[in-house]
């Protein structure tokens, strides 16, 4: 006999499954890249639900690929080791000593915690970094800043901060034909074998474009893109996104996330979605219900 869930009658469960069936059929066999980060990572209950959702996607025939961040955890470890850290345009300046800590935290503790959570939820996850099988070949990220007084552009040295150059999509295609769920730490490898710290959003977008994912799901700490009256905008085209940036509706820390979504869609991803990862089962609400965030696509 099926175990009874408290507070949910059998008819409601059956109706929910029936309503989700068209969405399940649409996504069957498709790849979904999920960027996992923000405060949801630090909430054990939300982390468990996230793991359950990822396992469910695999069990119904989808191919989930998880790319995770870990900025707060890196900051905590650097503070514990009394290593000072600074930021330029939201990116952590990463010297040789710092990049070793970044790799240890991302590829080590965080990655393995997430792998364990998915395995405990009934899945079969494997942890990777961009170094494994040259999954993420990277190059040094170059940034410039124009001086306000002289208007001279100054090159900023971020140290071992990189950006994806080539994604080895063939490695991830192997997992599509298996029961394994890849969990990727955003560490890249340079041409000379050097280690690069890569922004998790950027890494997820590059991976999604390389595997031509049907969806890039960006789990964040906000509801999505809001208009000037703070109302959620649920469906945006690339042209509308650019207009919202130009008129100042989209600003601040949301711009880099939006730019990642735009680049992913331009790179072949059907649509990218910014979702509030603090909402229980946000992934399922987005994929199998009426949506839970802001969807960005080329055109309607």
Image: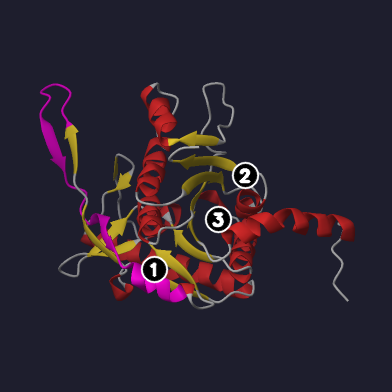
Image-based side of 215 in relation to 50, left or right = left
Residue 282 among magenta residues: no
Question: In the visual, does 57 lie left or right of 214?
Answer: right
Residue stretch in magenta: 146-175
Q: Looking at the image, which residue is at 22% across and 57% down?
A: 160
Q: From the viewer's perspective, is the residue at label 2 or at label 1 nearer?
A: 2
Give the x, y percent position of residue 210.
Answer: 35, 60
How far is disc 1 from disc 3 in space, using C-alphas?
17 Å
Q: Which of pointers 1 and 3 lies earlier in the amino acid sequence?
A: 3
Taking depth in this image into account, of 105 and 276 the one nearest to the observer is 276
Q: Where is residue 78 in the image (x, y as percent from the top left)?
A: 36, 57
Q: What element carries label 1?
A: helix
Q: What element carries label 2?
A: loop
Q: Quadrant of residue 244?
A: top left
Expressed as whole percent of the image width and height from the top left, the position of residue 237 reads 46, 35
Q: Position of residue 202 (x, y in %)?
A: 35, 51
Q: How far apart are marks 2 and 1 (CA)?
A: 32 Å
């Amino acid at each position: 006999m099926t175990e009874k869930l408290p507070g949910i009658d059998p008819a409601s469960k059956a109706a929910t499954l029936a309503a989700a069936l068209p969405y399940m059929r649409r996504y069957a066999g498709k790849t979904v890249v999920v960027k996992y980060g923000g405060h949801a990572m630090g909430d054990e209950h939300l982390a468990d639900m996230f793991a359950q959702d990822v396992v469910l996607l695999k069990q119904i025939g989808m191919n989930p690929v998880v790319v995770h961040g870990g900025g707060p955890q890196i900051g905590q470890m650097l503070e514990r080791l009394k290593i000072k850290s600074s930021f330029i345009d939201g990116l952590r300046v990463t010297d040789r000593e710092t990049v070793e800590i970044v790799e240890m935290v991302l590829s080590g503790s965080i990655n393995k915690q997430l792998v364990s959570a998915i395995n405990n939820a009934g899945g079969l996850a494997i942890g990777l970094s961009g170094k494994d099988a040259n999954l993420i070949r990277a190059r040094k990220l170059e940034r410039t800043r124009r001086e306000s007084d002289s208007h001279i552009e100054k090159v900023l040295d971020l140290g071992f901060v990189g950006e994806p150059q080539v994604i080895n999509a063939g490695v991830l295609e192997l997992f599509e034909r298996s029961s394994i769920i890849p969990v990727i730490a955003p560490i890249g490898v340079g041409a000379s074998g050097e280690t690069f710290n890569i922004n998790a959003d950027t890494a997820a977008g590059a991976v999604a474009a390389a595997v031509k994912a049907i969806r890039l799901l960006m789990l964040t700490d906000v509801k999505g893109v809001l208009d000037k009256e703070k109302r959620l905008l649920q469906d945006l085209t690339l042209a509308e996104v650019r207009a919202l940036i130009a008129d100042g509706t989209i600003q601040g820390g949301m711009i880099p996330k939006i730019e990642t979504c735009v680049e992913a869609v331009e790179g072949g991803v059907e649509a990218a979605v910014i979702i509030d990862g603090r909402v229980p089962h946000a992934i399922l609400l987005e994929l199998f219900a009426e949506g839970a965030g802001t969807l960005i696509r080329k055109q309607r």
